[in-house]
Amino acid sequence: MRAHRRQVRLILVLCLGMLPISVEAKTNVTKQPFGKVADGTPVEIYTLADGTIEARIITYGGIIQSLKVPDRNGNAQDVVLGFDSVDGYVSNPGPFFGALIGRYANRIAHGQFQLDGHTYTLPKNDGDNTLHGGRGFDKNVWKAREVENGVELTYVSNDGDQGFPGTLTAVVKYTLAGNALHIDYSATTDKDTVVNLTNHSYFNLSGQGNGDILNEELKINASRFTPVNPNLIPTGVLAPVAGTPFDFRKLIVIGARINQNDEQLKNAKGYDDNWVLDKTAGQMTEAAEVYDPSSGRVLSVWTTQPGIQFYSGNFLDGSIKGKDGRVYGHRAALCLETQHYPDSPNQTSFPTTELKPGQRYHQVTEFRFSTR
């Protein structure tokens, strides 16, 4: 009998040993209508939920409309700024809340660049600069299809769209798994062009509309950044962050140095700069971390991109009412936009953003959430 019991226990141990230590819950994906744009094109909203995190993505602009994340006590709150209807996004395009940005994220100086000996002229929508591609990908409805754990969005930008050469087909896949929102970007072209895609979510880890982000703590894994001139265009220098208010190599309270008498801070009225990440090109590494002491939420940004733009919500001024009627005041959120460097088409010393026929643009970014 004892031998039989030992044999049963051994069989149970062997069987249990074959089971995975942990099983990730499958993400539930649902789709609903989310209104229409002016020409009657319907907009849909996809909800991705894995039992811990819930992300809602709309087909207008590929926008992350909502991102609900638990705090240290398990209470979930929406941590991104946005609107309750598509009309809100159409009426307030300037902040780019949660949107997919293209063809070129960030600024291109003087609204033009040269490629293959030809000068391409773009619309100027930021003083003398082109910002986020002019009337970019964020202001169009993307085609969508459900995929495992998420949604895949496709947008075709025709040759000459906003002055950019080549017909560019962009595909962006949002998937939710393991406490992380994974964003996979790819693009192909039929003519030499430039491309720089990102997501422009505004995060407040205390919850959207719950005050400012000045008490949140930030770390950026970068020992250099790209200083800008008064028009917010990089000077071409890769400057060390050591000894400056731009040194976030350790967790620093965002508000600690934001009002210092520094030329770069004055240019942008706060932080709105690109950091040169300490990493190997194309390697998936942690770029930044944000910690909110009040809620315990931690956001870790991982990417294959060479740079990240940290924007401290300097131009939010309380004139916009967002979800649930919340007023978005000064510095009510921050952006961490993984990217190539601003104005790269005009800066030969920066990593190239050129894409040729037969090549595939591809990059990955993840927003990973935890508590502390």
Image: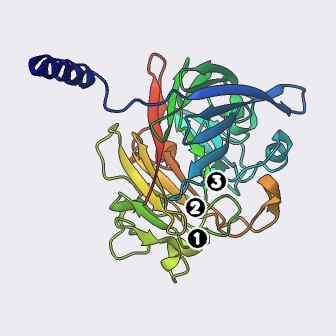
Query: Circle 2 — which element?
Result: loop
The residue located at (61%, 26%) in the rendering is 151
Q: Is residue 69 visible?
A: yes
For the C terminus, which image quadrant?
bottom left
The x and y percentages for residue 213 are 59, 68
Q: Are marks 2 and 3 in contact (CB under 8 Å)?
A: no
- What's the residue type where badge 2 is placed? Leu
Q: In this view, does 123 lie to the left or right of 260?
A: right
Residue 232, numbered circle: 2
Query: Circle 3 — which element?
Result: strand
Is the residue 345 above or below the residue 206 in the image?
A: above
Distance between the alpha carbons at the discs numbered 2 and 1: 7 Å
Query: Circle 1 — which element?
Result: helix
The residue located at (71%, 62%) in the rendering is 209
The residue located at (51%, 65%) in the rendering is 292
Distance between the alpha carbons at the discs numbered 2 and 3: 34 Å
The x and y percentages for residue 310 are 52, 59
Q: Earlier in the sequence, mark 2 or mark 1?
A: 2
The x and y percentages for residue 217 are 47, 68
Is the residue 27 above or below the residue 227 in the image?
A: above
Judging depth in this view, the residue of 164 and 76 nearest the camera is 76
Q: Mark 3 points at which residue?
A: 77
Q: Closer to the camera: disc 3 or disc 1?
A: 3
Residue 267, numbered circle: 1
The x and y percentages for residue 187 are 53, 25
Residue 26, numbered circle: none
Q: Is residue 157 visible?
A: no
Distance between the alpha carbons at the discs numbered 3 and 1: 34 Å
Q: In which quarter of the image is residue 119?
A: top right
Q: In this view, does 173 lie to the left or right of 288?
A: right
Judging depth in this view, the residue of 272 and 152 nearest the camera is 152
